[in-house]
């Protein structure tokens, strides 16, 4: 995309794309309710073109509802933009910054063939960044909640949690809002590479226990690392299951 208009995200800082990990083994997939075909469908989907559509600062700017949408939410500095870049295999799609709270609008991306996307990705503003004014935070919150409540094409919200810190009070507050709005969401841990191997399982169990009280939460928690590529294939597979199957164009090979 060339040129830079008022709704175009600022140029992202350079970032290395996530390295490809070897495909998960069969036992690992079955434990997560996945099969090899799901992984391949996810790989196929995220290998398609992905284009920035628009940045939205008020409801009047929302694009028309069409195909299925997946939104990404999380605390500021949770690694949301890095995860979107890792999923799509592009290092500069969603802007990244060392300064939390840089995403100040709803950014829409079309994933799939131009004119017939299989999925719309929506990068939501991060929450919980103390340096923003109360008025700014309130405006972002209203915009996000109005979008969530009124978007019938929204299939799921991916709620990102920093694996180093686990669930915080503002995460629970966000999930309560999603529960009230009857919006399905799934928790995904980021930065799992920052934990010691012995800390991963206890953190996952702690988060699973924490989301049990939330009625709209998907029971499967996925642990990811945008740096090492961990969990990226599994998350792609989960998301591919929510996309428009005809628009994906993927057909499983005969066994």
Image (spheres, helix red, strand yellow):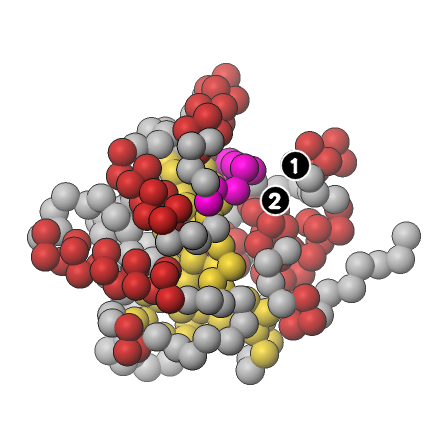
SS label for mark 2? helix
Viewer-proximal residue among 66 and 9 = 66
- Residue positioned 73% across, 36% down in the render: 30
Viewer-proximal residue among 194 and 33 = 33
Percent across and percent down for residue 209 are 46, 26
First reached walking from the N terminus: tag 1 or tag 2:
1
SS label for mark 1? loop
Query: Which region of the structure is painted magenta?
Result: 216-225
Q: Is residue 221 above or below residue 131?
A: above
Percent across and percent down for residue 26 are 76, 36
Answer whether residue 224 is magenta in the image.
yes
Q: Is residue 147 visible?
A: yes
Numbered mark located on residue 142 in the image? none
Are discs 1 and 2 less than 8 Å apart at CB? yes
- Residue positioned 49% across, 55% down in the render: 156
Task: Determine the image quadrant of residue 142.
Answer: bottom left
Answer whether residue 6 is magenta in the image.
no
- Residue positioned 70% across, 43% down in the render: 34
Q: Is residue 189 above or below residue 52?
A: above
| Residue at which label 1 appears | 32
Percent across and percent down for residue 48 are 60, 68
Percent across and percent down for residue 203 are 45, 24
Viewer-proximal residue among 48 and 122 = 122
| Residue at which label 2 appears | 234
Left or right of 225: which side holds 252?
right
């Amino acid at each position: 995309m060339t040129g830079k208009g008022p709704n175009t995200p600022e140029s992202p800082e350079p970032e290395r794309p996530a390295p490809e990990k070897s495909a998960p083994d069969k036992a690992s997939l079955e434990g997560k309710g996945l099969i090899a075909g799901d992984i391949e469908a996810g790989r196929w989907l995220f290998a398609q073109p992905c284009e920035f559509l628009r940045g939205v600062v008020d409801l009047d700017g929302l694009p028309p509802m069409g195909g299925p949408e997946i939104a990404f939410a999380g605390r500021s500095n949770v690694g949301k933009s890095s995860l979107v870049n890792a999923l799509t295999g592009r290092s500069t799609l969603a802007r990244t910054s060392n300064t939390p709270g840089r995403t100040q609008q709803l950014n829409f991306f079309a994933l799939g063939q131009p004119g017939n996307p299989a999925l719309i990705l929506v990068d939501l503003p991060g929450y919980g960044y103390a340096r923003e004014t109360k008025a700014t935070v309130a405006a972002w919150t209203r915009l996000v909640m109005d979008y969530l409540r009124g978007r019938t094409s929204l299939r799921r919200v991916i709620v990102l949690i920093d694996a180093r810190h686990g669930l915080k009070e503002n995460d629970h507050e966000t999930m309560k809002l999603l529960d009230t709005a009857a919006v399905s969401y799934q928790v995904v841990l980021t930065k799992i590479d920052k934990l010691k191997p012995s800390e991963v399982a206890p953190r996952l169990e702690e988060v699973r226990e924490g989301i049990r009280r939330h009625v709209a939460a998907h029971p499967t928690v996925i642990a990811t690392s945008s740096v090492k590529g961990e969990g990226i294939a599994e998350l792609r597979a989960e998301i591919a299951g929510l996309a428009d199957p005809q628009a994906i164009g993927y057909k499983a090979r005969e066994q």
